[in-house]
């Protein structure tokens, strides 16, 4: 559980820093490649520690390639969401994928108890209902983009879980970093964005370097899913809502509404109830 909380905290800082770096005019493909020094270093470390690329079979390569391609499709839309909207507006909606993931994993894998399942569903419903603009009775203008991102995210989270049930998180991390990089470099080159990496200002790199922490968070989350199961991991990640709102307020001056603050406390209370009765 401690690793899950550390992963959530790092991910919150990384998300806010990544959003800030988007304001410096580097186009999406080049922007994604700007985070690659960290995974390359980690991959080299894993290889030196004994990981053998040549022993990998075709099945994990194929599945991880699908995940990487889904990310490449999703990334420009996701970046546009973060660039156009405040984190406090879009973040609650970015939990829609967790509804389907929790339900599907509960019935397919039976990896959690009934109380964990129902508390998770309540948490998700509270987050979504509390995010609707009841005064104007409408969703955000970017809701169609959110639905697209969350649909893609649902598929690749389930593919994550399928892989981690059969293979190690080290294999997944190494193959993903390699299989994402090749088409990402090709697309950046074809769209004349590859050279953008050489042009951004120092503030861009400062925020992007902090954003590199997202790779550490992601590897830790793979370890958490492997050890705790998918549903419990997702439930613990909800604590990141409050952390992200706080960090976003400090660095982006994104003032959360009273509804968002109340939502944060409600989610935390439900998670502690789950932890007590699990």
Image: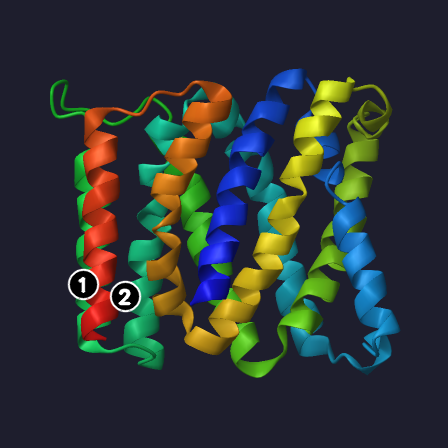
Q: Could you tell me residue 93's position as x and y percent?
A: 32, 38
- Residue 132 visible, this orientation: no
Tag 2, which secondary structure? helix
Q: Could you tell me residue 56's position as x and y percent?
A: 77, 79
Location of residue 40 by image quarter: bottom right
The residue that mark 2 highlights is 103
1 vs 2, front mark: 1
Identified at 82% across, 28% down, the residue is 197
Residue 184 sits above or below residue 81 on the image = below
Asked whether, in this view, residue 231 is left or right of residue 16, the answer is: left
Identified at 55% across, 42% down, the residue is 74
Q: Earlier in the sequence, mark 1 or mark 2?
A: 2
- The dot on residue 228 is none
The residue that mark 1 highlights is 273
Asked whether, in this view, residue 42 is left or right of residue 162, the answer is: right
Q: Could you tell me residue 3's position as x and y percent?
A: 50, 64
Q: Residues within 10 Å of mark 2 (few under 14, many from 20)?
A: some
Q: Quadrant of the C terminus?
A: bottom left
Tag 1, which secondary structure? helix
Q: Nearer the viewer, residue 57 or 16?
A: 16
Q: Quadrant of the N terminus?
A: bottom left
Residue 256 sits above or below residue 51 on the image = above
Q: Could you tell me residue 179's position as x and y percent?
A: 75, 57
């Amino acid at each position: 559980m401690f690793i899950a909380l550390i992963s959530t905290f790092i991910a919150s800082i990384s998300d806010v820093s990544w959003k800030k770096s988007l304001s410096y005019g580097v186009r999406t493909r080049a922007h994604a490649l700007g985070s690659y020094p960290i995974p390359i270093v980690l991959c080299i470390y894993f290889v030196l520690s004994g990981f053998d690329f040549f022993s990998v079979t075709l099945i994990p390569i194929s599945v991880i390639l699908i995940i990487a391609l889904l990310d490449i499709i999703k990334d420009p839309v996701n970046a546009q969401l973060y660039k156009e909207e405040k984190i406090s507006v879009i973040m609650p909606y970015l939990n829609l994928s967790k509804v389907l993931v929790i339900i599907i994993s509960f019935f397919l894998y039976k990896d959690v108890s009934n109380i964990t399942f129902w508390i998770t569903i309540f948490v998700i419903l509270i987050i979504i209902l509390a995010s609707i603009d009841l005064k104007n009775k409408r969703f955000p203008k970017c809701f169609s983009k959110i639905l697209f991102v969350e649909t893609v995210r649902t598929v690749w989270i389930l593919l994550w879980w399928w892989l981690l049930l059969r293979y190690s998180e080290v294999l997944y991390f190494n193959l993903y970093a390699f299989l994402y990089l090749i088409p990402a470099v090709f697309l950046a080159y074809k769209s004349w964005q590859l050279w953008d990496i050489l042009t951004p200002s120092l503030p861009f790199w400062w925020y992007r370097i902090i954003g590199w922490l997202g790779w550490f968070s992601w590897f830790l989350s793979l370890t958490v899913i492997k050890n705790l199961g998918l549903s419990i991991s997702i439930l613990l990640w909800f604590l990141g809502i409050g952390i992200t709102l706080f960090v976003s307020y400090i660095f982006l001056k994104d003032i959360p509404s009273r509804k968002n603050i109340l939502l944060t406390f409600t989610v935390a209370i439900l998670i502690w109830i789950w932890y007590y009765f699990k």
